[in-house]
Image (spheres, rainbow, N blue to C red):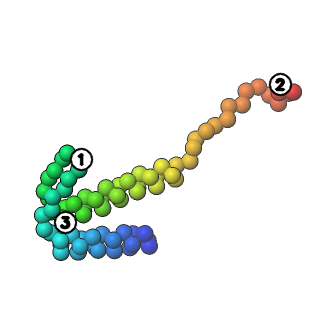
């Protein structure tokens, strides 16, 4: 429950920041240039970070599914 509350607080702070900074800015990435609202850029950056964090967290929580294959009986191993 605390994670949900923290997530909502972060989203609200980003929303307020985005509303107050709605001026258009020019984004340059290598040879690609475009102009967009700072609010959209901040929101998309936050969204990409949240998605990347969720993917990394889910990958870290996955347990490896390695199973040992046992063939024969214990007497054969001697």
Give residue 34's position: percent from left, percent from top. Answer: 14, 53
Tell me which residue sits at (25%, 58%) in the image.
Answer: 44
- In the rendered view of the protein, which quadrant contains the C terminus? top right
Give residue 43's position: percent from left, percent from top. Answer: 24, 62
Q: Relative to 76, is 41 on the left or the right?
A: left
Residue highlighted by disc 1: 30
* Mark 2, other Cα within 10 Å: few <14 / some 14–19 / many ≥20: few
Dot in front, 1 or 2? 1
- In the rendered view of the protein, which quadrant contains the N terminus? bottom left
Residue highlighted by disc 2: 76
Which mark sits nearer the N-terminus, 1 or 2?
A: 1
Answer with the quarter of the image where residue 27 lies: bottom left
Give residue 16's position: percent from left, percent from top. Answer: 23, 75
* Mark 1, other Cα within 10 Å: few <14 / some 14–19 / many ≥20: few
Query: From mark 1 to mark 3, how far is it between C-alphas?
Result: 22 Å
Tell me which residue sits at (80%, 28%) in the image.
Answer: 73
Q: Regarding mark 3 in the picture, which secondary structure is present there?
A: helix
- The reply to whether dot 1 and dot 3 touch (C-beta < 8 Å) is no
Q: Regarding mark 2 in the picture, which secondary structure is present there?
A: helix
Tell me which residue sits at (38%, 53%) in the image.
Answer: 52
Residue highlighted by disc 3: 39
Q: Is residue 24 above or below residue 32?
A: below
Which mark sits nearer the N-terminus, 1 or 3?
A: 1
Q: Nearer the viewer, residue 1 or 38?
A: 38
């Amino acid at each position: 429950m605390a994670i949900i509350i923290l997530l909502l607080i972060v989203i609200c702070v980003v929303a307020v920041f985005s509303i107050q900074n709605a001026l258009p800015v020019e984004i340059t990435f290598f040879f690609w240039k475009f102009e967009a609202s700072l609010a959209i850029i901040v929101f998309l950056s936050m969204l990409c970070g949240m998605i990347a964090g969720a993917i990394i967290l889910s990958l870290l929580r996955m347990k490896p599914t390695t199973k040992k294959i046992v063939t024969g009986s214990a007497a054969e191993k001697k």
